[in-house]
Image: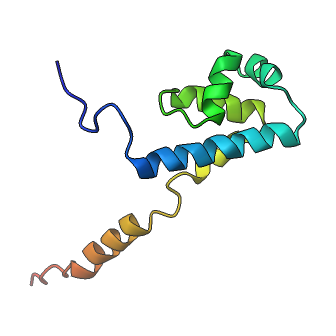
């Protein structure tokens, strides 16, 4: 049996971000004047799952989040995840600067 490296709870910082995502989804639903039941039907999940998403529950699968975003016509927003990746770009730039030219063979 393997043990989870992060334990059973998310770090507080991630829990807060999940709550923000849930609140943003809730506001998007309310702006569209949709009930939880309507979104649940469109996303083919239960109203309880929609409520859990809107509360920021970390145990809801990402596939369900995608279906809810699709039901709200926000599914393209998923493409914004990790788009900036400033750390990754910085590391890539460092590796590019360290590259040296191959020696010229005569």
At a point 78% along the width and 42% down the height, the residue shown is 28
- Occupied quadrant, residue 27: top right
Asked which colour scheme the image uses, the reply is rainbow
At a point 19% along the width and 81% down the height, the residue shown is 100
Residue 43 in the image, given as x and y percentages of width and height: 71, 22
User: Is 60 located above or below residue 103 in the figure?
Assistant: above
User: Is 10 located above or below residue 92 in the figure?
Assistant: above
Taking the image as shown, residue 75 lies to the left or right of residue 3, namely: right
Residue 22 in the image, given as x and y percentages of width and height: 63, 40
Residue 97 in the image, given as x and y percentages of width and height: 27, 81
Kindly tell me whether residue 76 is visible in this rendering.
no
Taking the image as shown, residue 88 lies to the left or right of residue 34, namely: left
- Occupied quadrant, residue 9: top left
Quarter of the picture holding the N terminus: top left
Residue 38 in the image, given as x and y percentages of width and height: 82, 21
At a point 63% along the width and 21% down the height, the residue shown is 49
Query: As rendered, which of 96 and 44 lies closer to the eye?
Result: 44
- Occupied quadrant, residue 52: top right
User: Is 85 located above or below residue 80 in the figure?
Assistant: below
User: Is 37 located above or below residue 10 in the figure?
Assistant: above
Quarter of the picture holding the C terminus: bottom left
At a point 80% along the width and 37% down the height, the residue shown is 29
Q: Residue furthest right?
A: 33
Taking the image as shown, residue 87 lies to the left or right of residue 83, namely: left
Query: As rendered, which of 80 and 14 lies closer to the eye?
Result: 14
Disc tally is 0
Kindly tell me whether residue 84 is visible in this rendering.
yes
């Amino acid at each position: 049996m393997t043990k989870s490296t992060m334990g059973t709870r998310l770090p507080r910082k991630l829990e807060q971000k999940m709550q923000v995502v849930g609140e943003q989804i809730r506001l998007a639903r309310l702006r569209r004047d949709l009930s939880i039941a309507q979104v649940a039907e469109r996303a083919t999940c239960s109203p309880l799952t929609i409520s859990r998403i809107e509360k920021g529950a970390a145990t809801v699968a990402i596939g369900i989040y995608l279906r809810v975003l699709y039901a709200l016509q926000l599914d393209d927003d998923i493409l914004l995840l990790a788009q900036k990746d400033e750390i990754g770009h910085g590391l890539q730039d460092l590796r590019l600067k360290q590259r040296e030219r191959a020696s010229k063979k005569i």
